[in-house]
Image (cartoon, rainbow, N blue to C red):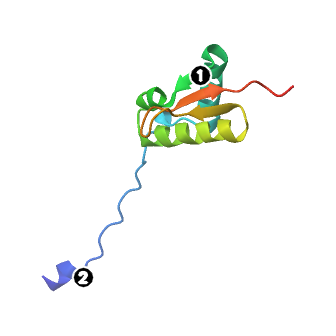
Amino acid sequence: MLRLLQRKPADPAPRAILPRDTAITLAQRLEQFRDRLRRRGRFSFRRAILECANRLEVVVSFLAVLELLRAGEADALQETPWGDIQVVALAPAA
């Protein structure tokens, strides 16, 4: 019994958190959102999140919206607390 307890456990094999083919980059998501803004002028953040396959895509989508806001490319409108957020295209500066 003592020998069994003194034995060093085997190192676990490293495992991927997410399969590589499911990840989306911030640049890819920004381009998708910019395309939506060009075509429609706005999009629903809630709908964009519902399209996500995993939490990483949700986080990347949130960061992409923040980048659009920071860059002055879009504004976010929310009519009610806890309501859907509409991401709206802003006119480019002249």
User: Identity of the amino acid at label 1?
Assistant: Arg
Residue located farthest toward the left when viewing the structure as drawn: 1
Q: Which residue is mark 2?
A: 6
Q: Quadrant of residue 74?
A: top right
User: Identity of the amino acid at label 2?
Assistant: Gln
Q: 76 or 51: which is nearer to us?
A: 76
Please determine whether, in this image, residue 26 is positioned above or below residue 86: below
| Position in image of residue 1 (x %, y %) | 12, 82
Q: Is residue 45 left or right of residue 27?
A: left
Q: Quadrant of the C terminus?
A: top right
Question: Which residue occupies 18% across, 78% down?
Answer: 4
Question: Which residue occupies 79% across, 26% down?
Answer: 92
| Distance between the alpha carbons at the discs numbered 1 and 2 | 63 Å
Question: Which residue occupies 48% across, 28% down?
Answer: 48
Identify the mark nearer the N-term, 1 or 2. 2
| Position in image of residue 53 (x %, y %) | 41, 32
| Position in image of residue 58 (x %, y %) | 47, 39
Numbered disc in front, either 1 or 2:
1
Mark 1 neighbour class, 10 Å CA radius: few under 14, some 14 to 19, many 20 or more: some
Q: Which residue is mark 1?
A: 42
Q: 21 or 73: which is nearer to us?
A: 73
Q: Is residue 25 left or right of residue 58?
A: right
**Local secondary structure at mark 2:** helix
**Local secondary structure at mark 1:** strand
